Image (tube, rainbow, N blue to C red):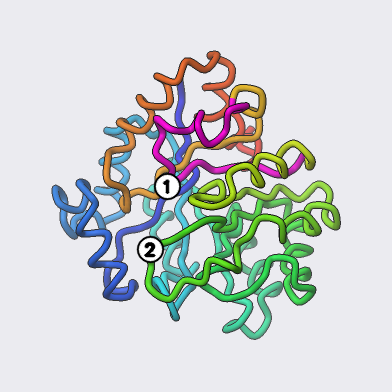
Amino acid sequence: MPLIDFHTHPWLPAHLNHATVDFIRSISPAVAEHHDRLSDPGHAADVLRSQGVDRAVVLPEHCAETSGDVRTETVLEHCAARPDFYIPFASVNPNLDDDPPALVRRYTAAGARGLKLYPSYQFFYPDERRIYPIYEACMEAGIPVLLHVGSSVIPGTRVEFCDPVRLAPVARDFPGLPIVMAHGGRGHWYAECAALVRDHEDVYIDVTGLVPSRLLEHFPDLAAMADRVVFGSDWPAMPKSVAHNVAAIRALGLPAAALGGIFHDNAARLLRLG
């Protein structure tokens, strides 16, 4: 079964804040084994392929006040080393960038296939009207928006900004815009995220950062909503391997069609991979 990891990060410690680097080094078996060789995009791709990953979305992290400042330009350059494997996303910061919608258009023209926003790291509510032009630019480009929705251990994060209820107006006002909730409401809002998926046909859950063996505790109707769930790992910032998480999800007893959607088909549809 092919595997798309919808949520990875480049290991670029010079671009991350010290607390973020220390945290990742404390939990990541990949960093412990490979150290800064993971900064080489070719080596990182080989490691992920060895874990069964066929394609990997790579996320910037334009969050200078909290986790770090891995810019979109850096991710585009990183992904260009293995274009058959990596899928670059863009990130803009509504509080730091002068013209975020123009940046979205520029980044998508340069090859970005989606947009990552970090409300609790960048300090904005997803339904603020000043954010709407960013969504409009994504609609024009035909790309999904991935938003951090859930708790975080990163110092300075403000979890009140990622309450998923603030995504309901966005889903109503932008029908057809794929909205992906990274971390599925981790720690606070599993039921709310599931309700959004039920109520809005273009809303998805990314299970990154959740203990895979507990997914049915968080989402009892996972099999029924599996066409709106995507697999992500947060690699290399994860305490187990990608292969471990995949095996744990396989062990949940979900139907084969549901597993195919979670591991590949839903992400391929969002990314328009054909």
Residue tagged 2: 153
How many angstroms separate mark 2 from mark 1 (CA)?
A: 11 Å
Instruction: Give x and y (percent) for residue 69.
Output: 42, 74
In which quadrant is the C terminus drawn? Answer: top right
Identified at 27% across, 75% down, the residue is 18
Identified at 47% across, 63% down, the residue is 60
Instruction: Give x and y (percent) for residue 185.
Output: 56, 50
**Range of the magenta residues?**
201-222
Identified at 44% across, 80% down, the residue is 65
Q: Are marks 2 and 1 in contact (CB under 8 Å)?
A: no
Between 91 and 165, the one nearer to me in the picture:
165
The verdict on residue 219 being magenta is yes
* Residue 209: numbered disc: 1
Instruction: Give x and y (percent) for residue 124.
Output: 63, 74
In the displayed structure, does residue 106 sit left or right of residue 253? right
Tell me which amino acid carries mark 2.
Answer: Val
Instruction: Give x and y (percent) for residue 248.
Output: 37, 26
In the displayed structure, does residue 25 sit left or right of residue 162? left
Tell me which amino acid carries mark 1.
Answer: Gly
Residue 11 appears in the rendering? yes
Task: Judge whether 223 appears above or below 13 on screen.
Answer: above
**Dot 2: few (<14), some (14–19), or many (≥20) neighbours within 10 Å?**
few
Label 1 residue SS = loop
Label 2 residue SS = loop
The verdict on residue 175 being magenta is no
